[in-house]
């Protein structure tokens, strides 16, 4: 372990039991760890301003030694607004994986303290992922969570003013027969109704996250008693939700209770999963939400909302599937209007999204392996570069055999058997290109490259949906790697 000289005493406490002098709490240090025991001890003894850096190593947690029998890793310590406690991978380009023992066992990372920054890490294999209880003013950024038995991230028991940003959450609800509890992000407490003690986990913000596929319950579940939740600039892939066959049922992207929610600038795509019955559901104790500037893709016959409780303020939301049904039943129109509640509005943030989603939020990493990490890996990076290397851009191969013009902001089926280039009326610099598997031709799914004809940039299509925001130019060549001739695109 490499520590600053002034940490000599602190190191001895991390490696063995000791009583720390009061002066320890005035120290702020950089602690490098490379195994689970060192990480557990660093979390137990953290002080304001400390930075805990994970080197290459094994981080398989043990509930018997974490400091909480509920959790594989735990801390009750707090930083301050000016000196938060930080835990992160030392090298952003080599994120370390914090791991539990089973999808049926415990919280993976359990925090009851305030003013933490948790970033550039991966979390897998526990009953619950990151759990905040009575934890306030924390930031969780640029993290991946998968292979979780129930919900991935849960903020409850008066956990307020926390930020979850640029996350990638997938493959939750992995406990057999318990898929209905596999939410992506859960705010508040179940059964926190008016007859019970309300959980005022207020003013939490989730943005820039890519949630799904195989999140078996709702991407977001906001419980009663919660106020001021902001859900913005996220991408939700609904593929893999459990639907009404689960208990409890899960058939929407977002369940809203509580009040004063802001839902804006999100993209929600059912990905042809018929278990998605509607996009947003308001339930008990819901009172007011501003929902605007979102894009929804559902079955064209499905409603955008199922509204049991008032009031949804709806504006500038777009159905990309051509559907026009707003609410499940006509009486629910009384619970919706188009006038935003300005009293609950807060400034929007911008987000880069999880940095391994190289083709933008809503895509998957180039390396899609979700197998268990190797617990014996202690490899150090070759250098100290703390940035993710850009993928190599393949060369342009050949010229266009023909070009099809695609209307702006129009989802268009493309057959590239004879016309292997597409052209848009506008330059795609600072714009968005979406690509889907073809609906009209299901015999195969295009996988390959979309390349600008001037060779400046190319992107890879590796799944049934992608959204790219790093392209430029008007004309692009489609180069399949699997001989499939069909793809659907939209630029806007």
Image (cartoon, helix red, strand yellow):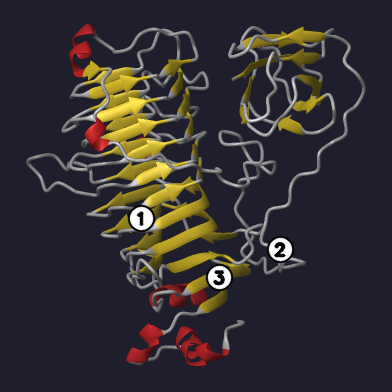
Q: Name the residue that disc number 3 marks.
A: 53
Q: Disc 2 and disc 1: Cα gap in Å?
A: 31 Å
Q: In this view, does 17 lie above or below 439?
A: below
User: To which quarter of the image does residue 253 belong?
Assistant: top left
Q: Dot 2: what SS?
A: loop
> Relative to 113, is 105 above or below?
above
Q: Which residue is drawn at 78% across and 33% down?
A: 457
**Residue drawn at the location 57% of the way across and 85% of the way down:** 4
Q: In this rendering, does residue 227 appear at all?
A: yes
Mark 1 residue crowding within 10 angstroms, few (<14) / some (14–19) / many (20+): many
SS under mark 1: strand
Q: Which of the labelled discs sits on residue 131, or is there none?
A: 1
Give the number of the mark in front: 1 or 3.
3
Q: Residue 63's spot in the image, x, y percent?
A: 40, 67
Q: In this view, does 474 lie above or below 89?
A: above
Give the Cα separation between the discs numbered 1 and 3.
Answer: 20 Å
Q: Mark 2 points at which residue?
A: 385
- Numbered mark located on residue 18 in the image: none
Quadrant housing the C terminus: top right
433 horizontally vs 215: left or right: right
Q: In which quarter of the image is the N terminus?
A: bottom right
Q: How crowded is mark 3: few (under 14 residues within 10 Å), some or many (20 or more)?
A: many
Quadrant in which residue 403 is drawn: top right
> How far from the left and from the top, in percent, is residue 208?
49, 41
Residue drawn at 46 percent across, 76 percent down: 42
* Closer-to-camera residue (244/35): 35
What SS does tag 3 mark? strand
């Amino acid at each position: 372990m490499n520590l600053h000289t002034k940490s000599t005493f602190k190191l001895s406490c991390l490696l063995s039991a000791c009583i720390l002098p009061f002066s320890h709490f005035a120290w702020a240090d950089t602690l490098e760890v490379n195994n689970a025991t060192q990480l557990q001890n660093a979390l137990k003894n953290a002080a304001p301003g400390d930075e805990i850096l994970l080197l290459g190593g094994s981080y398989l947690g043990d509930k018997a030694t974490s400091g909480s029998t509920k959790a594989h890793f735990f801390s009750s310590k707090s930083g301050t607004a000016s000196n938060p406690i930080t835990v992160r991978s030392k090298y952003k380009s080599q994120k370390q994986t914090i791991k539990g023992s089973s999808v049926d066992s415990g919280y993976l990372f359990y925090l009851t303290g305030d003013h933490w920054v948790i970033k550039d890490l991966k979390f897998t294999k526990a009953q619950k992922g990151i759990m905040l209880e009575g934890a306030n003013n924390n930031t969780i950024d640029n993290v991946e969570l998968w292979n979780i038995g129930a919900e991935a991230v849960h903020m409850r028991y008066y956990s307020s003013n926390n930020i979850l940003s640029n996350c990638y959450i997938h493959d939750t609800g992995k406990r057999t027969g318990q898929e209905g509890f596999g939410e992506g992000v859960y705010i508040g407490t179940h059964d926190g109704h008016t007859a019970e003690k309300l959980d005022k986990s207020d003013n939490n913000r989730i943005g820039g996250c890519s949630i799904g596929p195989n999140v078996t319950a709702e991407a977001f579940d906001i419980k009663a008693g919660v106020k001021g939740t902001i859900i913005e600039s996220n991408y939700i892939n609904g593929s893999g939700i459990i639907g009404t066959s689960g208990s409890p049922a899960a058939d929407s992207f977002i369940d809203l209770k509580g009040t004063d929610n802001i839902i804006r600038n999100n993209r929600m795509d059912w990905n042809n999963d018929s278990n998605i019955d509607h996009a947003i559901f308001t339930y008990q104790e819901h009172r007011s939400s501003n929902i605007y500037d979102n894009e929804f893709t559902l079955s064209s016959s499905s409603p955008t909302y199922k509204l049991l409780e008032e009031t949804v303020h709806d504006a500038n939301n777009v159905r990309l599937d051509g559907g026009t049904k707003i609410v499940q039943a006509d009486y629910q129109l009384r619970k919706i209007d188009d006038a935003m509640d300005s009293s609950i509005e807060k400034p929007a943030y911008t987000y880069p999204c999880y940095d391994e989603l190289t083709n933008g939020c809503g895509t998957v990493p180039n390396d899609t392996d979700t197998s268990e990490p190797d617990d014996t890996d202690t490899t150090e990076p070759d250098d100290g570069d703390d940035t993710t290397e850009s993928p190599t851009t393949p060369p342009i191969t050949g010229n266009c055999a023909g070009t099809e013009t695609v209307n702006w902001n129009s989802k268009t089926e493309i057959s590239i058997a004879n016309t292997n280039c597409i052209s848009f009326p506008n330059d795609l610099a600072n714009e968005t290109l979406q690509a889907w598997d073809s609906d009209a031709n299901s015999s195969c799914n295009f996988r390959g490259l979309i390349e600008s004809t001037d060779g400046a940039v190319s992107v890879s299509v590796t799944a049934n949906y992608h959204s790219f925001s790093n392209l430029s130019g008007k004309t692009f060549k489609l180069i399949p790697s699997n001989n499939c001739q069909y793809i659907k695109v939209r630029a806007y």
